[in-house]
Amino acid sequence: MSDKNVILTTGIYNMIKDHIRRKKVTKQEEELLLLELKHANQVFRRDLPEDVVTVNRRVTIKDHTENKEKEFMFVATTKTNNKKGKLSILCDVAVATIGRQVGDVINWPFKDGDRKLEILNVETI
């Protein structure tokens, strides 16, 4: 968890709430997400800063736990295409980083253990 509030559009906010309600996350993730949502800044899509992780953005993340850099493209759940590297905005790494900005470092309880992630770059696709 980072100490800054996440920035989300209302659509994404509602999607995460629904994802939690359907029990698609672990209990630990659920607690963190509900806390984040409680303090989230909700904005209109046009007011969302360019460097915030959200849908239709290419995101470069450094996994400090594995010391690896990876690039992800987060898209709407209906537009996923693993061959093209397009991942659902509700996949584990997206849920962990959504609403975060470049420079944020997050400690997150993934199903296979805690990981420390840093957001290096975000660009619109």
Image: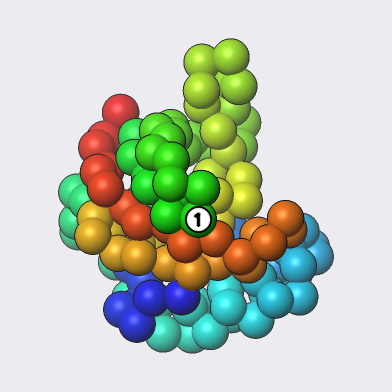
Q: Nearer the viewer, residue 36 or 121?
A: 121
Is residue 93 visible in the rendered image? The answer is yes
Where 4 sits versus 86, above or below? below
The answer to whether residue 100 is left or right of residue 92 is: left
Which residue sits at x=70%, y=67%?
Answer: 20
Amino acid type indicated by mark 1: Thr
Quarter of the image for residue 108 reads bottom right
Image quadrant occupied by the C terminus: top left
The answer to whether residue 67 is left or right of residue 21 is: left
Which residue sits at x=60%, y=22%?
Answer: 82
Question: Within 10 angstroms of label 1, few (less than 14), some, or many (20 or more) residues?
Answer: few
Number of marks present in the image shown = 1
Where is residue 59 drawn, in percent x and y?
35, 40
Which residue sits at x=34%, y=82%?
Answer: 3
Location of mark 1 (residue): 65
Where 47 sits versus 94, above or below? below
Where 10 sits versus 120, above or below? below
Where is residue 10 drawn, in percent x and y?
43, 64
**Colouring rule applied to residues:** rainbow
The answer to whether residue 108 is left or right of residue 67 is: right
Q: Nearer the viewer, residue 60 or 50?
A: 60
Is residue 97 visible in the rendered image? The answer is no
Asked which secondary structure carries label 1, the reply is: loop
Where 106 sits versus 52, above or below? below
Q: Nearer the viewer, residue 8 or 68?
A: 68
Where is residue 16 drawn, in percent x and y?
58, 62
Where is residue 61 drawn, in percent x and y?
38, 45
